[in-house]
Amino acid sequence: MGLSEALGQRDTEALLPVTRAMELRKRNYYVERPLLNQEQLEELGCLTSATETHQWRTWFQCSYTRARALLLQHLPVLAWLPRYPVRDWLLGDLLAGLSVAIMQLPQGLAYALLAGLPPVFGLYSSFYPVFIYFLFGTSRHISVAALGPLSSLTVLGHPTGGAGPGPLRLRGHLPVRASGPRLYHSRVHTGLRLAAQVCVWPPTEQPLWAAVPHLFLEVCWKLPQSVVGTVVTALVAGVVLVLVKLLNDKLQRHLPLPLPGELLTLIGATGISYGVGLKHRFGVDVVGNIPAGLVPPVAPNPQLFASLVGYAFTIAVVGFAIAISLGKIFALRHGYRVDSNQELVALGLSNLVGGIFRCFPVSCSMSRSLVQESTGGNTQVAGAVSSLFILVIIVKLGELFQDLPKAVLAAVIIVNLKGMLKQFTDICSLWKANRVDLLIWLVTFVATILLNLDLGLAVAVVFSLLLVVFRTQLPHYSILGQVPDTDIYRDVAEYSEAREVPGVKIFRSSATMYFANAELYSDALKQRCGVDVDHLISRKKKLVKKQEQKLKRLKKLQKQTAASKDTSVSIEVHSSTRDMESNNMEDSQVSTGNELEGMVASGQEGAKAPDVTTLKALGLPQPHFHSLVLDLGALSFVDTVCLKSLKNIFRDFREIEVEVYMAACHTPVVAQLEAGHFFDASITKQHLFASVHDAVLFALQHPRSSPASPVLMTKL
């Protein structure tokens, strides 16, 4: 029984490869088409040249349809609000708006304190920008309001040193378009945000690495002067906030809404402060007077433009990077599109209008956005509800928080920094996932610590761009081989079953070729082909040059011999020495006459036969392949250096009797090749094929067994 089972198992294992092969055959497909080069492909596909359109002409066109489209594009609320499903979404948006407003109230007060401003400014920043974003934003789920990193950045740009309200109207970045290239990496704003959270210090001209130790020593020096009531209040508030956050994490599945720990702490601390009299009995500093009602708008002060432009740029880049990254995450999760251009316009207008009404810079908060999504928020109606709730507090309920201890707001800031400081754990994950991103992260963080935030951002952007250039100079070069019985070609070093096609070399680069790596491309090509092309060309030129010089000498001697036969040698001789010299010359010419005639004749025959200058005729080693195929599928654009390098490749390999073909060029690249006058009498579109397989088949059908002169093109 055991023997029969073993035999049955062995038969089953033997049948497995056959079964798999049969399954593969069932999935086979067959395509029969002619071999296509670029000319045949354009004729078969009926390539049409795109008509030139001048974009500036459409800017001045005016019609009802265009005006309506522009209005809906720049004011998205008019597009989605009329189609708003009230029955399905209104209740969720109301709950989400109230939940976000409950979080915005304490955080807005705390972040205003962090920015060195009166706490009421945090309420203003939670109303005006949020309502403006409701009108102009395209993301349905992000919550726009005061944010910790931007508040810490505002300390740096505060014209009064963060000690008072000051003229804040220039903090908002202007609405511009974001359709240009993204010059920052996602890890740039992550490192910048973390550095901004770590390094919050009173304004100083010193860099961060010098200011932070000085601040730490100053804090330690003034510890004996601390107010005991303030320290105890901050510690108690911090412990309560941490406990509530831990409770929310454990009961997340069972609670319909997270517990508003910050709001409960503020209400409780305000009640205790009012009932016990913390300010008068223990000297605890409180928020103080909160003016009821809205403040009138104030025009910006143009004198501050020069001093704030650097900080404004930093704030704009960091704020936009945070908002657009979170917006795209939520859009991908819920299946809608976020317009980057309109998002920058919305954030710019939010900060611009908010700056006129004494608001400090705002952006998107991840924690509040997650709360807005998890509590049923579907659109920015939730943001409008939260801003209206803050408006009610500004107009009527703000006076109730006059006895709120500032130490509680400081505890709110410190506890909220916990999530940001957890980003240090990204180092381990980035080390495993992508070390280049980790390098950008570290450079951004260290540069910000050493050079301040504005210079740190500039260093990070420049480093990211240089890293892109550096990575294009180190692409993966490979020699391709054919996967058996397919038209698929893969790197022979990576695929053990891929085999090089006899007589054909296929070369591919993983990056586009341009001025920064064109020379590296040529060098890698010559190295991977296994032939010292430059040395072989140099030896060939030397031998050809020697042969040409020898032929010239033979022709010259032939002319001298012919002239001596036509001229009489019977001349008077006045000197015996001259007579002897003339006799010697005549004897030498006569003795070499027959030899010269044979050599010149053979030289004339060699001039008629081009094989005299071939590698074989010159006694030089021949390459083991007759055709070279360049896979240009990774080529996204070409410049003049790339064109020149490709021409040099054609010239050099034809010198060693190897024909060159190109394959898999995209249509825009072909158009750029034509515009750069790449194609001529020796390099035509018949050297460019639709795929690598087409080029290989053509090369196998047209081997250069008896090559012509290098300057002559191959007749295709």
Image: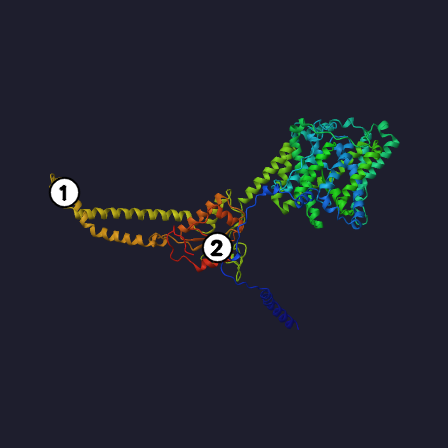
Q: Earlier in the sequence, mark 2 or mark 1?
A: 2
What amino acid type is highlighted by mark number 1?
Answer: Met
| Residue found at the far front of this picture | 63
What amino acid type is highlighted by mark number 2?
Answer: Glu
Q: Which residue is mark 1?
A: 580
| Residue found at the far right of this picture | 275
The count of marks equals 2
Viewer-closest of 111 and 71: 71
Assign a secondary structure to mark 1: helix
What percent of the width, then of the height, locates residue 478?
A: 51, 51
Q: Is residue 546 left or right of residue 158?
A: left
Q: Is residue 200 visible?
A: no
Q: Is residue 481 left or right of residue 164?
A: left
What percent of the width, then of the height, locates residue 9?
A: 63, 69
What percent of the width, then of the height, locates residue 622?
A: 39, 54
Residue 708 occupies quadrant: bottom left
Residue 325 occupies quadrant: top right
Viewer-closest of 241 and 599: 599
Closer to the eye: label 2 or 1: 2
Assign a secondary structure to mark 2: helix
Q: Residues within 10 Å of mark 2 (few under 14, many from 20)?
A: some
**Residue 28 image label:** none
Q: Quadrant of the C terminus?
A: bottom left
Q: Which residue is mark 2?
A: 39
What percent of the width, then of the height, locates residue 370?
A: 75, 45
Q: Residues within 10 Å of mark 1 (few under 14, many from 20)?
A: few
